[in-house]
Each structure stands twice: as structure tokens, then as C-alpha cells.
Image (cartoon, rainbow, N blue to C red):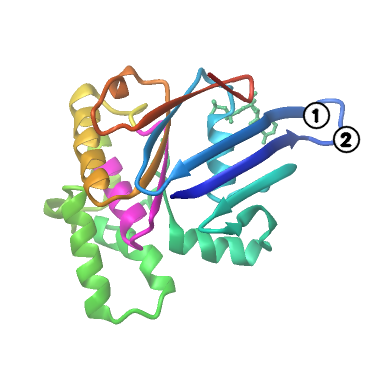
Amino acid sequence: MSNIVIKNLYKLYNPNKPNAFYALKNIHLNIDDGEIMILKGISGSGKSTLLSLIGGLSKPSEGEIMIHEQNIAKLPDIMSSAFRHQEIGFIFQSFNLLEGLSVYQNILAPLALTTLSKETMHERIHQAMQLANIEHKKDQNVSSLSGGERQRCAIARAVVMNPQIILADEPTANLDKENSLMFIEILKKFKALHKTVIIATHDSVFDDLECIDRCVHMRDGELVE
Ligand code: ADP
């Protein structure tokens, strides 16, 4: 079953201005529940724009994005924030951690918006840290972590709400080879958990991996065969 259905998607930046620019054009894409998909393309081809629309961070100019049968393109901002909080885990290239706070506090942040009990929150954080292999650093200030550890903290934070969909934008761009391979180990855990994962990348480390179901290419805002 497809849990993401994208139809006729367009994104126009700077509409009605001389620098108006179509970053996405005529995108049709179905992504199955539990599918791990790579979105490939050179810088500027539209990968981040597509992820941000799927994640409800911005709205399309035209078209539909059905997630669990809800058209998120049409949700008012307050509802798309709530939807994103529950359903989507984002892993950003630059990690977007809360500097000055510990690993544990960073992972707690999304849960702080919920009414879960303290015990449940603690259990969720523990599970997320285990999945991302960062538990041994739980009390360390994130500002003093290595790049790989920062990313593992960001991954734990992305999964602590237990989202079905995980979006990763150039997740290995700031990592060395060893940490990139560690990311792939976490990807295999996502596969085992039947998460739907979309990774925008041009890193060849993802080529020919068994855990990856599909690789889709983008060029100039369009999907190419
Ligand atoms: P990728 O992730 O593949 O590098 P992006 O989605 O970031 O590509 O960008 C696609 C195109 O859209 C690029 O040409 C970029 O300059 C342009 N773009 C991205 N964001 C904006 C914006 N906020 N305003 C105008 N143009 C943008």
C-alpha cells in the first residue's frame, strides 16, 4: 500500500517576480509503506524542496501530497505542524541541534509538547538513543560531540515520536566514511522497523545497498527515468 501519493506537484519560488523559478515540475510519485527510497540528483535539482513539501515544511504551488489519505498540501499551518510532529521525522544535513543542551535534553524536546507521562518519555528517549547508538553520550553537551555523534543525536530526536515516515536530507554530507557506514547500519534498523524512509543524497555510499528498495533520479525539478 502507498502511504505517500504525490500527484502533479509543482513548486514555484518567487511567484509574480522577475526571478520566479519552478523548483519542482510535474512530480508524480507513490511511495509504499515501509519503502526505503533514495532521491538522487545534483545540487539544485530540487531534492530538498521535495522533502520539505512532503514534510509539510512548505506548501506546493500546485498538486497533491496525500499522506495516510490526508492531503497535507491543503492543511492549515497549525495542523500541518501537528501532523509533522506526529508523523514525520526529519534528519537534516546540519543536524539542527539545540546547542548548549545535552543529548538527552535534545531528544526530549519533541516529547515536551506531548502529554505523555515522565516514565513513558524516559522510555521513549532510551529506545531512541539505543536505536541511534548514542546512549553512552546521553549527558554530554551536544556542542562537544563529534560530527557522527551529533548526527546520531539528531537521528534519535527524529525518531523519538515514533514517526512512520523519516526524511533525511544529505545525511552523510558532513560525515566521514566510518560514520556514513554507521548511518547505513541505522538505516537497516529502520528497514526492520518497516519505516518509510526517503533520503535525498548524491553520495555513492548508498549505491547498491540491499536495504534500499528504489532509487529515483531528479533533474531540473523533474523526476527522470
Ligand atoms: P537540491 O536539494 O537538489 O540541492 P533544492 O531543492 O535545494 O535542490 O533547490 C532547487 C532549486 O530551487 C535551486 O535552483 C535553488 O536555488 C532553488 N531554491 C531553493 N529554495 C529557494 C527559495 N527559497 N527561493 C528561491 N529559489 C529557491
**Structural crowding at the residue carrying mark 2, measured as other residues with C-alpha within 10 Å and reported as few (<14), some (14–19) or many (≥20):** few
Q: Nearer the viewer, residue 222 or 12?
A: 222
Reading the image, the residue beneath label 1 is 20
For label 1, the SS is loop
87 or 35: which is nearer to us? 35
Q: Quadrant of ligand 1?
A: top right
Q: Is residue 219 above or below residue 168?
A: above
Q: Amino acid at mark 2?
A: Asn
Judge whether residue 100 can be spotted in this image: no
- Relative vertical location of residue 169 with respect to residue 144 in this rendering, above or below: above
Residue 157 in which image quadrant? bottom left
- Give x and y (percent) for residue 40: 46, 23
Q: Position of residue 106 (x, y in %)?
A: 33, 58
- Callout 2: SS: loop
For label 1, count other residues whose C-alpha is less than 10 Å away and answer few (under 14), some (14-19) or many (20+). Answer: few
**Residue 113 appears in the picture as rendered:** yes
Are discs 1 and 2 less than 8 Å apart at CB? yes
When asked about the image quadrant of residue 94, the answer is top left
Specify whether residue 186 is painted magenta: no
Residue tagged 2: 16
Is 151 included in the stretch rendered in magenta? yes
Q: What residue span does the magenta drawing correspond to? A: 149-171
- Name the side, left or right, on which 68 lies relative to 222: left
Residue at (52%, 63%) from the top-left corner?
83
Identify the residue at image location x=37%, y=26%: 173
Look at 27% across and 49% down and name the residue there: 153
The kind of residue on which mark 1 rests is Ala
